[in-house]
Image (tube, grey):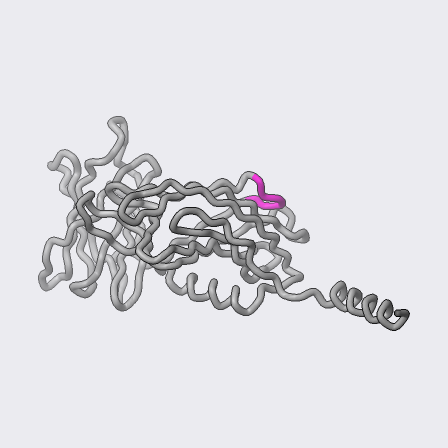
Amino acid sequence: MQILRHCAAAALLLCLCEPGSAGASPWSATTGAAIRLVPGSSTPGERSAGLEIRLDPGWKTYWRNPGDSGVPPVFDWSGSDNVADVTVLWPAPQRFDDEDGVTIGYKADTVLPLKVEPKDATRPATLSLALGYAVCKTICVPAKGEARLTLDPAIPPDASAQALLATAQAAVPQPRALGAAGAPAVLGIAVDGSAKPLRLTVTARASSSATLFVDGPPDWYLAVPQAAGADAEGRRFTLTLDGLPKSAETAGQVLRFTLVDEAGAIETPYTLP
């Protein structure tokens, strides 16, 4: 018995001195889906994590701009500890066409990478998420999920969490300036100021299967740009700014164009004149 007590004490001391790797939070399940938080690597000034969304076969959820009839996720981090800010990154989405119009989102399991800024870089940061989102199969279902995860730079994430987050980060569209070389690229944007509402024509260097998405200020509804053929200059897409609040001023507002192609995905900001 004395030997067993000594072994137990030694094992406990080993656990205290050599902490294991950090794993994901428990799953928070709802109809058609479940969410959890996954730890990533940490530096003194920034911690990384991921929001993993698991979808049942045939179900989908939505991007930050959900399209014609979708619902964007709403993130509440107010219950977090030692967290100054959380930035959500978005892997390249898909376009879905059905009888309700065009929606934008994800139909397979996905991970949204998170950049977490701690208030005190010397202390662990605890993420507490209350998520409101929607999942759809034949009909859309409002969903809620909760997850909590402590990010401690002294405890590295386990190998499976690192691999999961690395794959998600690689799927996030890369920033690319307007008119940049290479492909894919947004080459130019022409604004028809005589049209009411404003009409934009976007020229892109991309394949025939490329899809263009756009989002802007939070209270703007922006439809999915429509493919409008191609010429020697590139592929063309058109967008009419007809989902804006009545009092909205367009001058100086920034739109984000996300171009998804076989060769990769990019994100290009554009300031309306």
Picture quarter with the N terminus: bottom right
Q: Residue at x 31, y 47 (%)?
A: 136
**Which residue sits furthest bottom?**
3
- Say which quarter of the image contains residue 74: top left
- Magenta region: which residues? 79-84
Picture quarter with the C terminus: top left
Q: Say above or below: 186 vs 9.
A: above
**Residue 70 shows up from this direction:** yes
Q: Nearer the viewer, residue 148 or 144?
A: 144
Q: Say above or below: 194 vs 181.
A: above
In the image, 251: left or right of 172?
A: left
Q: Residue at x 14, y 55 (%)?
A: 236
The question of residue 36 being in magenta is answered with no
Q: Position of residue 100 (x, y in %)?
A: 20, 43
- Say which quarter of the image contains residue 244: top left
Q: Position of residue 39 (x, y in %)?
A: 55, 58
Q: Say above or below: 128 vs 206.
A: above
Q: Residue at x 19, y 65 (%)?
A: 207
